[in-house]
């Protein structure tokens, strides 16, 4: 599966422009960076609790995401780009919702979109912890 190129995603772009309509356009642009991944769209990868169909998996310590919602794609692109750039880590990913509030995004997103982002974060944490547990359970040889 090919990793999405999120190199143009930069949180400072959102911080510099606090107007919701501008931020929305930026998120929609970033949403277009998430490519459709047919192989990802299977039941086991489906994110529960997200009103839009969305899928997530973790392979080789890389997250792969897809959704039918461009705004959810944009928010996921922002989160994934920050993980890839080391701006946030899995240890503090739960604080990302606070970051959305600081940017003013939280108040403009519908309850279902906010729930979708929370579901995405929960699934990322679950997948990451499962992978971490499996690594630790392997015998050393």
Image: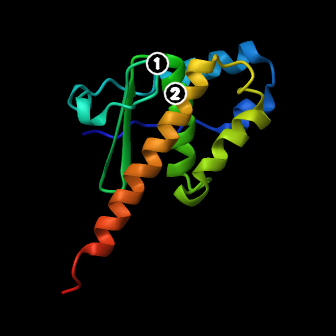
Separation (CA) of disc 2 from disc 1 = 6 Å
Residue farthest along the bottom direction in this orientation: 141
| Residue at x 71% of width, y 41% of height | 99
Query: Would you say residue 77 is visible in this rendering?
Result: no
Q: Is residue 107 above or below residue 21?
A: below
Q: Is residue 112 above or below residue 47?
A: above
Please give the residue where the numbered disc 2 appears in the rendered image: 116
Q: Check residue 51 in the rendering and tell me which mark sits there, or answer none.
A: 1
Q: Quadrant of the C terminus?
A: bottom left
Residue 108 rendering spot, x and y as whole percentages: 72, 18
- SS label for mark 2: helix
Depth check: give the residue in front, 4 or 47.
47
Tell me the quarter of the picture where residue 57 sits: top left
Would you identify the image quadrant in which residue 63 lies?
top left
Image-based side of 68 in relation to 71, left or right: left
Name the residue at 81% across, 25% down: 18
Crowd band around label 1 with a 10 angstrom C-alpha radius: few (<14), some (14–19), many (20+): some
User: Can you say whether 123 is above or below 16 in the image?
Assistant: below
Locate residue 17, reporting x and y percent: 79, 25
Residue 76 placement, left or right of 102: left
Residue 105 placed where, x, y %? 71, 26
- Is 64 drawn above or below residue 60 in the view shown? above
**SS at mark 1?**
loop
The residue lying toward the viewer, choosing from 105 and 32, is: 105
């Amino acid at each position: 599966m090919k990793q999405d190129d999120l190199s143009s995603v930069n949180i400072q772009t959102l911080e510099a422009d606090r107007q919701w309509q501008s931020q929305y356009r930026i998120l929609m642009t970033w949403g277009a960076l998430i490519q459709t991944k047919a192989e990802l769209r299977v039941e086991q990868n489906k994110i529960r609790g997200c009103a839009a169909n969305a899928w997530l998996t973790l392979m080789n310590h890389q997250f792969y995401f897809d959704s039918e919602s461009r705004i959810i794609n944009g928010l996921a692109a922002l989160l994934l780009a920050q993980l890839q750039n080391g701006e946030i880590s899995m240890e503090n990913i739960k604080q990302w919702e606070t970051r959305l509030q600081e940017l003013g995004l939280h108040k403009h997103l519908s309850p279902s979109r906010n729930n979708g982002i929370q579901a995405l974060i929960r699934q990322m944490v679950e997948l990451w912890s499962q992978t971490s547990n499996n690594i630790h359970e392997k015998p050393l040889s």
